[in-house]
Amino acid sequence: MGSQRSSMPSIFYIYRCISSITRNRRYQLHILITIIIYLIIYIYIQVKLIPTNRNSISCKNYSQNLVLNIKEKNESFQILPSVKIYTEQRVILNQSNVINISQETRLRYSFIDIDALNINTNFLDEIYHPSTNFNIKFPSSNSHSYSRLLNMKGNSSTILYNRIPQCYEFTMGLLLKHVSYLHSFTYIPSQIYTPFSYNQTSLISIARSLTNHKYNRLLYERHIYFFDFSNLTFSEHPVWINLVRDPIYRIALDFNNSREICRLTNRCFVNNNTINDTLDKCVLKYPPHVCISQENGVSKMIPFFCGLTHSIKCQDDSTFALKQAKQNIDFFYTVIGIAEEFYSFLYVLEKLFPQYFKHARLIYMNTRDSHQLADNRDVNIQLPNKITIKLLEPYLKDEYELYNYIKRRFLDQYRILTEMDN
């Protein structure tokens, strides 16, 4: 408003100068009207600019306060060094509330994150009685898959993220840590990395640990193949989510990282004869499909979705595995994102799970370097040469078909949600 007042004397000064030149009343009237119009336009522009500036300042302050809030929570958060867990209670485990579990029991349930999930092993030892009351509603097999795109598939108090190796795991892990602080839910990244597959008895114990936890909201992340809670006769099942990436990028990173882990630690899951090989060297020494097999430290994407209900067929029958994976995705997965569309994935998560992911994009952009939004460990990939890629293509046909199927499904979800927003 000060600029408006300062402009008034200059406007009237111009008017007096012009009026002194001519005493013609008609010209004076035209000049007066012109000045009034100019004044109205000037005031309108100034008034419009003030809220815009305030909004931009407010948005900037809000963003800064949000990040500061996360940092303050990080600083005040304390846990036992041996347990990675981020929780609504801020301090979930301390020396007074860690359950005293015998070594024999720990070995018996070594496939369960007993401490992180805070599970009473006596409950696990009890005889399991299958449920007779099912709250799981299955969509009709005749219904179009797109009609189920935005449905919440499961009980959202528990989200199970059966993470596929080398699919933005470091970038996603840091983000989940931040949003769990902000929205006060429990995030448990499992410390059990292998195997991915379990028998039915073990799966029942894993399912019991995930349906009887003590948390209000839990997001549990683990390398594990999909398994159907209803097939194990549980009355409810959690929400399943996942994140995939272009198969050749994922396989190249998996191949290299498996050898890096083998060289630096005692966890070695690869053929000793290929520890120092690149993927390019490997395909010159062995058949291409051997180089991208589990014995060489490379995991396939399809079994993570085909699951453990038909575990043998999922491994041996590629046609069945691909079909079953698509069916499980449609029936059980609320969302599967694409690493190459990571920001869009966060948008979909915000819309479908606001209680977990509200402001996820804002946190992501404000806690990363603007020049390197993804963790370097997720994007520093030594791709094989074109000849190697050509040799691998026939063996990645099904992987790419499923990847493109997931991509189309995800982009449809994103398109529908953005249209609803507009």
Image (cartoon, rainbow, N blue to C red):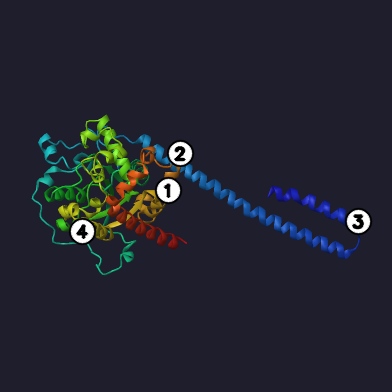
State the separation of the CA atoms marked 2 and 4.
Answer: 43 Å
Question: Nearer the observer, disc 1 or disc 4?
Answer: 4
Question: Nearer the observer, disc 3 or disc 4?
Answer: 4
State the separation of the CA atoms marked 2 and 1.
Answer: 14 Å
Q: Amino acid at mark 4?
A: Phe
Reading the image, the residue beneath label 1 is 361
State the separation of the CA atoms marked 2 and 3.
Answer: 63 Å
User: Going by the image, does 366 lie left or right of 36?
Assistant: left
Reading the image, the residue beneath label 3 is 21
User: In x, y percent, where is residue 97?
Assistant: 21, 37
User: Going by the image, does 122 lie left or right of 25?
Assistant: left
Residue 231: quadrant of the picture: bottom left
Viewer can see residue 225: yes
Residue 413: quadrant of the picture: bottom left
Contact (Cβ within 8 Å) of mark 2 with mark 3 = no
Q: Amino acid at mark 3?
A: Ile
Task: Using a 10 Å C-alpha cutoff, classify the residue at mark 4 as few (fewer than 14 neighbours), some (14 to 19) or many (20 or more).
Answer: some
- Lower sequence index among marks 2 and 3: 3
State the separation of the CA atoms marked 3 and 4.
Answer: 94 Å
Residue 19: quadrant of the picture: bottom right
User: In x, y percent, where is residue 70?
Assistant: 40, 40
Q: Amino acid at mark 1?
A: Arg
Reading the image, the residue beneath label 2 is 369
Instruction: Please tell me which residue is depicted at 27% across the width and 37% down the height of the picture.
Output: 258
User: In x, y percent, where is residue 376?
Assistant: 39, 38
